[in-house]
Image (cartoon, coloured by chain):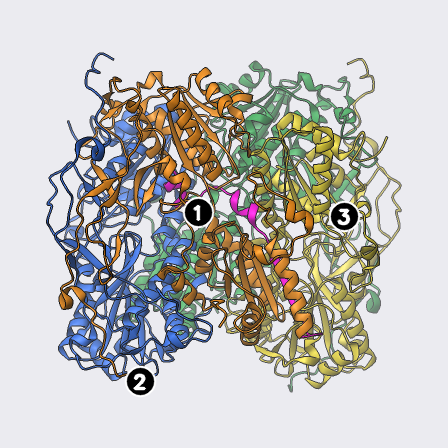
Chain colours: A yellow, B green, C blue, D orange
């Protein structure tokens, strides 16, 4: 080991180096809209939980307005730390000592928008259960078929009896749809029906709609609380640790990867190819890869890759086939979109949000792989089995981890709304449930940071190429 | 609402109240033993990952010794915050730029002790894979049958090929046993076999043993790294967020609760009773309860409860049977131990650690329930179905969430050991993998804090009694 | 191979030996009660299926009264075959061209009695669906809580909407109980409520009750059809191929066996012990053993066994532990009852049917195994892990095979009852659904024939002792 | 009830009508090739099972050459029964008292060909276990990668240790491929490698190849036994009751149907569309439909259907959407092939067997459905979610029912081959394992008989159109 000439790195900075003091001048508490912002004279009342016969709130039960959670918790002490920047903190979620709403006067509406996600029904069920069992609310309504349901269909009455077994079922019992957002019609309907609590469950487009609804309600100076519950199986929503249904999706993806692995192993030069959800982010693909350990290479939207040449996918697969006789690829649906040739029609085509439509990266990869092999190894056996498990993943009920998460999420939202917060989102930050401004969440994006330790590390686990041309 | 006379509480402290500045005088970085502590002249070498043909560590890949994680991240700004107390921080886990060990010279030993836990085989597999694939280590051995295996059996050679499918199997392929700890014999064996990396996977007793081995190795001034990987399906280990296998156990517990629920629902006055693991802590019982939502009452060791009288379990069940015709109870194995009558023999009996043996709280509760009903409702139908799913829970393979966790855990350990750290444990703190002194972990305990928001909150979800006599 | 002196046995009897002609003098068609037996002047009507707008019964759709199924289908041509004995045949199940009941006049009652079994809810659901969708019956009632429900509770109205998702749930949505059989009260209630079709789902005791109800109805000359649907997860009912829920139980038992196997494999001299359902028959134990292939020895009620001495269980286990280091035992709950010491109280104790109560063979075996090892191998490691998965097996929903079976079973019953048959049971004979006299089924018993090829063969698969002392 | 003028049909023919005697002049025992056909002087030897220390074959253990199974077991007594036609019977499978092969001289080869099917690995494992454990055979080889493996790769040695956990894994551990059949090369290789038992597992093409190998071996007068084990997840093989893996496939298909159902239910006018395996037969589609009960219409190759007009699919779906708001379609991959427009290239394209290639009926139907709706209901919400779960179904391990079946199947084959039978197939006939001439099986086809009670009945369960234009 001729090159070992340096001393071991100091490993214990605190002891060895006396780092510069690490301090915060102050904290910056993220603002959170409250109904009293527009109704300053409204009188609060004691939390009805005080009177629950079986349940006596103990000291420490209620969360105070000063309970906060730090957002950044990882630092490099050896770096150039901006010593006096304020520290971002968020309000902790939970029941408050006094509430804004008088339970008999509450008329709550729940709506689900966009595609399916494991846990949707659990969230709905727990909103109903939380409002009914904890706060004694009795007027709870489900708005069916997404945003358009506000103005086009009659809401359905919900109660613990109605929602009893919903958490055991996939999908949404309230039905869902895309689009149908008409701000005026929606806010008029909310007013006309007398709703004063609106729980909106949906993806990023839905959250942007919820912000508009919140703003319009503020403009009209209505005592109506609006809360958003982000639903994105892709886990692409920012600030919060993860979105509901994500762990279930990763669990279910194992079945597809396992099948792809079996197909690949049972063939001569077999490739198993699985396309997983993730239009702009590769979280499901990544975590499914880490969980499975049967995957040779994982391709995500956040990372460029290339097929041909040194350091490319084909070279890598060539080697894995040589070593093991088979290989498994996982590709997120949004990966490689720039590489897939588009017909003129496809170039024009836009989705509802005006973005170019997504092409099937799995079908394209399968065909590219076959062409490559036929070119390089004519006559030799080769098989690609392509699996797209999307609907089988997203239509299942939530697993235990997600059921528990959805339960706490829904109860967080109920506690926050009852306390009078509005225009907010509930969600875990570093493992603790917090309230976050809706607008902030609607703008945030959670991408895989390929420059971060985590991604590099994951890449080291799969031992796959970095697709950096050299 | 006559009593509503107070104004709404201020909800936005930052805006409204200008809280006192929140600052840290300095951070206190937890010390971490390193092999250079006893071998100061040892020369490090560049991380072999630098030379991986497919894998080019990018900037930001290596973790520096200054990368730290904050431990406390939740504060009450309105409380009397000790403004200048140092902030506890821990070393972040991950690959280091320079390593202590020369891969061809490494002889690594892996041992599993104590009872089964989902994910054991994944951890073993990933230790092997990490050492072999990332660092090029080729001498990796499994010590079989627990601590006694060091001195009583031949170790088995491990390689990626040998461990290939282990993460799909429950249990431990290395076999395990309790006891057998003989410090001198073990350290002698480690020396004689030339092991210089020792990975010890086991429960709290095992971790206390690992501390002793570490200290003895220090005393003998040997260049042998020791790392502990806490294995406790109960999730009762402190400091780290959760232990591996826990999420899988909660998932599997759903089956038992669901069966109990079905049995209860299908009977007239049916009670389903499930005993779950947790000798001193109720984490599994609690999370299984939260995930299932079929549970009417959850009893844990951290909480006193009583059967008779006002606010007692029987009164509560009486009401639930009246309302729903059935009820489901979950009880952690360590709950209510003080209430179960002991025979004289049982009073004397001690387990291996000298503690009174645990009695079967499930069997006792079943019998108490039957007696109560026969006394209060003679002749009326009543059924108690009691399920103890312990082995069916702990003997399964890890689910996706735990597999991913075990993978990162094992790789964390490998990176730390290769870098020369010793006497440490890897584990997530607030969601980020950290290195923690082994001794600190061996002494810490993770109990359900029944004074905390979280437990109170969970209790509000199940709406069960607080068992506080009034 | 000195002893090989005989020629190969002739293998093709038909060609080689011209066996004696194999013939039946005639068939003996098992009688089947019909409502016209006591109401000879009743006029039938065309099957309402004729008028289904989407569904046009094709030729061959209706089953004729002459459609029959052979019972014995395996013969030994070389044996002394009773050449002219009549051949037992049974009526084939299915829709009849003409029906006895006028759909608007039908009032159907469904009741479930005894313990749980996978598929119960599917059977109920399909009775409702079959009556409603195919025959246009609109008055269908669920009698709750077993036999006593006829005279003690109000029946609940059932419709396809009510039973919509029942086949996805374990247990019985109608609730069940044991006992409560009071012939007069039951038949009076049937008359008073105007029920003219009674579907009784239950075990052997329930079927004997159904015979009495059928006879009493005959005695009273009422136009009320009674059909029994045998429910026995043990598969101990005779004549029919298998009972519903059995395949699901065998499937679920794999989990317990697999856990026992993992526990055994992960220990030094580990024994995994699983008790499976089967009071008088070992079908579940046998099939679970065959399906799993992890089982070293399977003990069933139909087979004597012994522990000590040559050819005994201990000797066998000793050898397996020596070879493999672990072993898995499966024991049916009714096995070895004669060997378990009974206290005086237990000798007196009787169950509801007057039989001696069953003792826990698993607990007894576990203790015997521990004593044996401590005696023979003092100080050596040894572990027995005992799993009793009973409720986790029987409370699950039916798997696909059983769901399909329950569906055809229920529709068979509906077709038979609508056609006017009564006092009968539906069930598959050699793979074809048949109608069998209720009384015949109530008396038949399906035991494992340990003298038969099948058992011997299964024994050869597990390669376990025959426990015949020599 | 004006039209009810006929008397009730006689229901008890035996009693009422004294049917003509039902008799067989003789039985016709299906011939079964035996190695002594070409080696008449070969001496048999006692079955080695006689000497198994733990296992003492009892009376009734060995199957005699006269043990037979009836094929036709359902009759219509009222029909014109051909009273004196001989009755087809088959040899019962099982161990024989004397065997042809001397275990130490056996060299057995196992090969898997064609696509994957649940249970493949169980069959391989049990062939190895049966030969090794029961008969003491020690030379067992796996031929890898299908037929071509005989002449192009080295066989791998198999033993119980090697195959230990294979039944828990999907796919085939021996690898498989299509084609590669070269009669001369294969038989030469069999001879050169000294194989005298050849176990061939594969689909109908593979079975036709096995017939050729058997004939060629006969022609060469070699003492080599050949047995075929039909592998077709579609269950399209004739004579035997069902093929292995089928029940598992039906079970797994539930996941896809359930997901389709959830997607359909959660949308406004939602259609869930699932394509299941079955090129020429609809068994999986049918049984999955019966098991699920969430399916509104099931389309299979054996049944014509049409989309437009009265009694067509669109009309039916229109009605279901009106009633329920959603509908689920299951289509077998071979259904509707004649209706899908083919491009000129597709008209020319042939698969390896020279048949026109299959087009994706699911994709076509999805597009037709969308066009229909856009035409008939412009602007109204409508969703079709299409799921193709093929690989996720066929790549799983066998479930309990199939594992048990595969075990008995493999042991049947081993017993038959050891006894000297050749050119045969093992499989259940009316629930009993039989030996059937390979050629007969290779030519038989098991289609859904749409004229039969069973199909009509199933159709009545789903209540779907019969697609007969009127």
Quadrant into which the N terminus of chain C falls: top left
Badge 2 vs badge 3, beta-carbon distance below 8 Å: no
Left or right relative to A297: residue C363: left
Label 1: how many residues lie within 10 Å, few (<14), some (14-19) or many (20+)? many
Q: How many marks?
A: 3
Q: Nearer the viewer, residue D351 or A282?
A: D351
Does residue D390 show up magenta in the picture? yes
Left or right relative to D248: residue C48: left
Residue at image point 65% right, 53% down: D342
Residue at image point 37% right, 78% down: C137
Rendered image quadrant of residue C151: bottom left
Q: Position of residue D6 (x, y in %)?
A: 24, 80
Q: Secondary structure at mark 2?
A: loop
The CA distance from mark 1 to mark 3 is 58 Å
Q: Give the chain letter at badge 2.
A: D
Q: Secondary structure at mark 3?
A: loop
* Residue B48 higher or lower than C451, as above or below: above
Same subunit, tags 1 and 3:
no
Disc number for residue A73: 3
Quadrant into which the C terminus of chain C falls: top left
Left or right relative to A385: residue C11: left
Query: Dot 1 corresponds to which residue?
Result: D235
Label 3: how many residues lie within 10 Å, few (<14), some (14-19) or many (20+)? some
Query: Dot 2 corresponds to which residue?
Result: D3
């Amino acid at each position: 080991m001729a090159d070992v000439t340096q001393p071991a790195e100091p490993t214990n900075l605190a002891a060895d180096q006396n780092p510069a003091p690490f301090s915060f001048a102050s904290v910056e508490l993220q603002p959170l809209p409250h109904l009293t912002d527009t109704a300053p004279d409204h009188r609060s009342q004691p939390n009805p939980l005080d009177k629950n016969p079986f349940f006596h709130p103990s000291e420490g039960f209620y969360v105070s307005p000063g309970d906060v959670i730090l957002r950044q918790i990882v630092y490099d002490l050896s770096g150039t730390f901006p010593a006096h920047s304020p520290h971002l903190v968020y309000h902790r979620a939970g029941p408050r000592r006094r509430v804004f709403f008088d339970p008999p006067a509450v008329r709550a509406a729940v709506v689900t928008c966009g595609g399916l996600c494991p846990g949707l029904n659990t969230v709905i069920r727990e909103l109903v259960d939380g409002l009914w069992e904890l706060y004694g609310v009795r007027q709870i309504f489900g708005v069916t078929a997404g945003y358009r349901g506000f103005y086009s269909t009659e809401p359905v009455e919900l109660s613990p009896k109605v929602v009893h077994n919903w958490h055991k079922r996939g999908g949404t019992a309230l039905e869902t749809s895309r689009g149908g957002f008409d701000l005026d019609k929606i806010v008029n309907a909310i007013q006309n029906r007398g709703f004063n609590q609106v729980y909106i469950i949906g993806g990023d487009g839905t959250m942007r709609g919820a912000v508009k609804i919140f703003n319009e309600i503020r403009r009209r100076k209505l005592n109506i609380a609006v809360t958003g519950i982000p639903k994105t199986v892709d886990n692409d929503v920012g600030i919060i640790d993860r979105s509901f249904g994500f762990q279930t999706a990763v669990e279910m993806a194992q079945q597809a990867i396992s099948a792809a692995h079996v197909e690949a192993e049972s063939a001569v030069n077999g490739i198993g190819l699985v396309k997983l959800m993730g239009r702009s982010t590769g979280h499901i693909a990544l975590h499914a890869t880490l969980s499975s350990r049967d995957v040779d290479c994982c391709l995500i939207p956040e990372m460029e890759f290339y097929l041909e040449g040194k350091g490319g996918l084909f070279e890598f697969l060539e080697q894995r086939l040589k070593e093991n006789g088979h290989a498994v690829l996982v590709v997120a649906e949004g990966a490689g979109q720039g590489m897939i040739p588009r017909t003129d029609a496809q170039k024009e085509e836009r989705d509802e949000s005006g973005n170019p439509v997504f092409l099937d990266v799995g079908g394209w990869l399968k065909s590219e792989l076959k062409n490559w092999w036929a070119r390089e190894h004519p006559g030799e056996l080769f098989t690609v089995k392509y699996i797209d498990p999307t609907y089988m993943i997203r239509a299942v009920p939530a697993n235990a981890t997600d059921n528990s998460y959805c339960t706490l999420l829904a109860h967080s939202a109920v506690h926050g709304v009852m306390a009078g917060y509005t225009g907010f989102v509930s969600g875990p930050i570093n493992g603790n449930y917090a309230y976050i401004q809706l607008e902030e969440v609607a703008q945030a994006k959670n991408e895989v940071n390929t420059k971060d330790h985590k991604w590099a590390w994951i890449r080291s686990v799969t031992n796959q190429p970095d697709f950096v041309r050299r």
